Image (tube, rainbow, N blue to C red):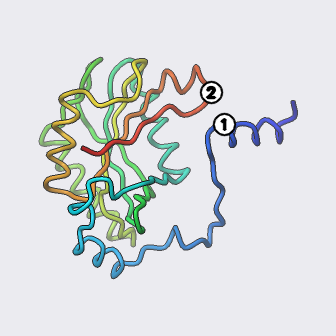
């Protein structure tokens, strides 16, 4: 199989949609974001969000970060926006957290780093808000543990709109396609 055919096969298996770089999806409209956040349609309809779109940049960062953790869980934050009933993840960054084989523990250092990163992003013109967090489940699938559900519920209480993404780097490598799940509580 030649490389073009292999790439097309991979894109089909992973539901990859290529968008032109000038596409509206990459533009941040502060007024539109303010309006949707003020309206809070997700409060009236718990199933308001139907889709999530993740940029190639954000996906690569999340998967590479998850792989770098080996057998330990890692955690990060995602930046993006909301359009209609879709959450759009534009970027992601790793958080300095203490991970074990079965959990990640965000301490004060992670929250300070998160705040500094968000401020620095705004200084260089990246206006997207935090729209979620991600963490890895190395080798044991994409689901939310009881602790994860509590974390997500807390995030949704104070930081809406917010989504949780779980990446399994072991299954991603063994299956040859990205293994992730997106969750709201």
Residue 41 lies left or right of residue 165; in this view the side is left
Name the outermost residue toward the bottom. 31
- Residue 99: x percent and y percent? 26, 25
- SS class, disc 1: helix
State left or right for residue 110 relative to residue 138: left
Task: State the CA–CA distance, disc 1 to disc 2.
Answer: 10 Å
Q: Earlier in the sequence, mark 1 or mark 2?
A: 1
Percent position (x, y) of residue 128?
36, 66
Q: Are marks 1 and 2 in contact (CB under 8 Å)?
A: yes
What residue do we see at 49% from left, 21% from top? 170
Residue 151, compared with residue 79, is above or below; it is: above
Residue at horizontal 34%, vertical 40%?
134
Which mark, residue 84?
A: none
For this rendering, which residue is in front, 182 or 78? 182
Q: Quadrant of residue 90?
A: bottom left
In the image as oriented, which residue stretches furthest toward the right?
2
The residue under the point 36% across, 79% down is 32
Q: Nearer the viewer, residue 39 or 119?
A: 39
- Give the vertical position of 173 relative to 2 (above or below): above
Q: Residues within 10 Å of mark 2 (few under 14, many from 20)?
A: few
Circle 2: element type: loop
Q: Residue at x 18, y 30 (%)?
A: 147
- Which quadrant is the C terminus positioned in? top left
Q: Residue 108 versus residue 56: which sits nearer the camera?
A: 56
User: Taking 21 as reference, is 149 above or below it?
Assistant: above
- For label 1, the residue is 13
Question: Mark 2 sits on what residue?
Answer: 176
Residue 181 lies, in percent from the top left, at: 42, 37
Q: Quadrant of the N terminus?
A: top right
């Amino acid at each position: 199989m030649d490389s073009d055919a292999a790439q097309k096969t991979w894109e089909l298996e992973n539901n990859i949609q290529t968008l032109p770089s000038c596409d509206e999806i990459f533009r941040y409209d502060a007024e539109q974001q303010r309006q949707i956040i003020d309206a809070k349609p997700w409060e009236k309809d718990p199933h308001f969000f139907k889709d999530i779109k993740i940029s190639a940049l954000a996906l690569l960062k999340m998967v590479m970060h998850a792989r770098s953790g080996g057998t330990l869980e890692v955690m990060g934050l995602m930046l993006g926006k909301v359009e209609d009933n879709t959450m759009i993840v534009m970027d992601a960054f790793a958080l300095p957290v203490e991970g074990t084989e079965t959990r990640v523990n965000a301490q004060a250092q992670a929250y300070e780093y998160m705040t500094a990163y968000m401020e620095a992003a705004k200084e260089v013109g990246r206006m997207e808000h935090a729209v979620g967090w991600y963490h890895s489940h190395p080798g044991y699938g994409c689901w939310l543990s009881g602790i994860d559900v509590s974390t997500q519920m807390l995030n949704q209480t104070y930081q809406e709109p917010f989504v949780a993404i779980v990446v399994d780097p072991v299954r991603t490598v063994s299956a040859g396609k990205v293994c992730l799940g997106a969750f709201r509580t």
